[in-house]
Image (cartoon, rainbow, N blue to C red):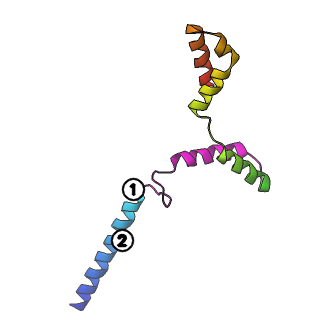
Amino acid sequence: MKHLMTVLTLSLAALSTSAFATSHKEAPMMAKGASAPMGAQQSKMGACNADAGDKKGDERKAFMKTCLSAKKETQQSKMKSCNADPKAKATKGDERKAFMKECLSK
């Protein structure tokens, strides 16, 4: 009877750990305090890594630091710079719309 109880206990323990491990494989890993998967950061890291090329050591570290900390220009800042352009101030109507569309798409 003791042997049967031991086998049942070990079987239950083995099944529960395999089910626990499977549930963690399905869920994305998240950093402590993060609210979403790190897909954007990982893709940025991949792009910077590809741009780094053959750089090594301190040169690579410095490049990766600046690349990863670079912020993408926001739509609002693009709009300000396009509006400040003298051509935008000099044009009106459809010509201005065309200029702004081209300027904002850069």
Residue 68 x %, y %: 65, 47
- Callout 1 touching callout 2 (CB < 8 Å): no
Crowding around mark 1 (Cα neighbors within 10 Å: few <14, some 14 to 19, many 20+) is few
User: Which residue is rendered at x = 39% and y = 65% of the image?
Assistant: 21
Residues in magenta?
26-55
Q: Relative to residue 100, is residue 53 depicted above or below? A: below
Query: Residue 98's x, y, as percent?
Result: 58, 13
For residue 23, above or below residue 9: above
Height in image: 84 above or below 67? above
Identify the residue under disc 2: 17
Outermost residue toward the left in this view: 1
Q: Residue at x 66, y 22 (%)?
A: 84
Question: Is residue 60 depicted above or below 17 in this figure?
Answer: above
Q: In which quarter of the image is the N terminus?
A: bottom left
Name the foreground residue: 82 vs 37: 82
Q: Distance between the residues labelled 1 and 2?
A: 15 Å
Q: Helix or strand or loop: what does disc 2 sit on? A: helix
User: Which mark is drawn over residue 26?
Assistant: 1
Q: Which amino acid does label 2 sit on?
A: Thr
Most extreme residue toward the bottom, as rendered? 2
